[in-house]
Image (cartoon, coloured by chain):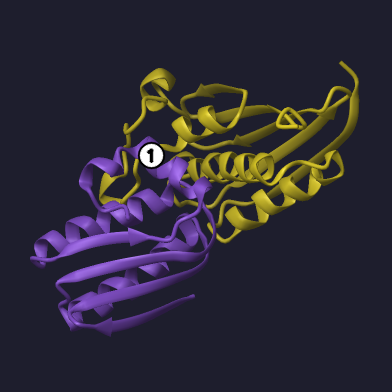
Amino acid sequence: MIKTEFKNSVLTAYIQGEIDHDSAAEIRAHVDAAAQSRKPKVLCLDFSGVSFMDSSGVGLVMGRYRQMKLLGGALRVKNYSDNIYRIFAMSGLESLGVLR
Amino acid sequence: MKSVNEMKLSFPSKSCNEAFARSAVAAFIMNLDPTVNELSDLKTAVSEAVTNSIVHGYRRQSGVIYISGRILENGRVTVKIRDKGCGIADVEQAMQPLFTTAADEERAGLGFAVMQSFCDKVRVTSTVGKGTTVTLEKLIGADD
C-alpha cells in the first residue's frame, strides 16, 4: 500500500490506492514509523498512486504536518489529482504551505 | 416522481465496509453513464456519511448501517444512509465545517462540508439515542 524512499534527508512516501478512514490508520502507522527511524528534514507524501480520497486524507495530512513540526522537519504533499485537491482546498490546508 | 430503479443494502459498521458501500453505490448508478467527476463526488459523499455512522453514530461499537438508493426518471439519484446509533444532539453544529468530536483521531471535521459540496442536496435527520439518517441527492448527467 505504501513504499518509502529516503534520499538527501527527504523521506518520500508513495501512497497507493484509496485513502479513507479504514486505510488512513495503516498509512499513518507506516509513515510515522518510517519518519521516526529516518528523522528526515522533509517528509514528502506522494499522492500519484491515490485513486480515491475522502476527508480522512485531510486528517492524515494535518496529523503528519504536526508530527513533522514536532520532529523539527517540514511536510510536502505532491502529485494529487484535481478531485483530491478540491477536498484539500476545503480544509484550509493551503495556508500551511505544504501543497506542491 | 417515479423511481426507475431502487436498491437496499445493510452491513455491519466495520470500517472495511466503507469501501464496499461507496463501490456498491457507484455500481448502482453505473447505467446512468456518470462522468468520472460525478462518480467520484457521490462515492466521496457516501464514504463520508458511512464513516460518520461508524465513528460517531456507533462510536466503534457494532451496529448495522442501512443504505437505500433510488434513481428517479430525470436522472436524479437519492442515497439514504441510516444508522441506529447515538444520534446527533445539535445537527446544525455538527454540520459546521471543521467541527469535530474526534480531533484526537485525526478527524478533520469536514464530512458534512464535503457531502454538501459534492451533492446537490444533503438532508440530515437525527434523534438522540435513536440514530441518524443522511439523505444525499445528486443529479447525474448534469455535467454534460
Please state the horizontal and vertical placement of residue B114, each as a whole percent of the image: 48, 35
The colour of chain B is yellow
Residue A3 visible (yes or no): yes
In the image: residue B72, left or right of residue B121:
right
Q: Secondary structure at mark 1?
A: helix
How many residues crowd mark 1 within 10 Å: few (<14), some (14–19), many (20+)?
few
Please state the horizontal and vertical placement of residue A42, each as a whole percent of the image: 19, 69
**Which residue is at 59% across, 29% downward?**
B134
Please state the horizontal and vertical placement of residue B18, each as a whole percent of the image: 58, 53
Vertical arrangement, residue B95 with respect to residue A59, above or below: above
**Which residue is at 60% across, 29% downward?**
B119
Q: How many marks?
A: 1
The chain containing the residue under callout 1 comes to A
Q: Quadrant of residue B29?
A: top right
In the image: residue B92, left or right of residue B120:
left
Please state the horizontal and vertical placement of residue B130, each as a whole percent of the image: 54, 29
Where is mark 1, residue-wise? A89
**Which residue is at 39% across, 68% downward?**
A27
The colour of chain A is purple
B65 or B104, nearer to the observer: B104
Amino acid, disc 1: Ala
B137 or A72, nearer to the observer: A72
Vertical arrangement, residue B70 with respect to residue A40, above or below: above
In the image: residue B62, left or right of residue B12:
left
Vertical arrangement, residue B128 with respect to residue B67, above or below: above
Vertical arrangement, residue A51 with respect to residue B75, above or below: below
A22 or B125, nearer to the observer: A22
Pick the quarter of the image with the C terminus of chain A: bottom left
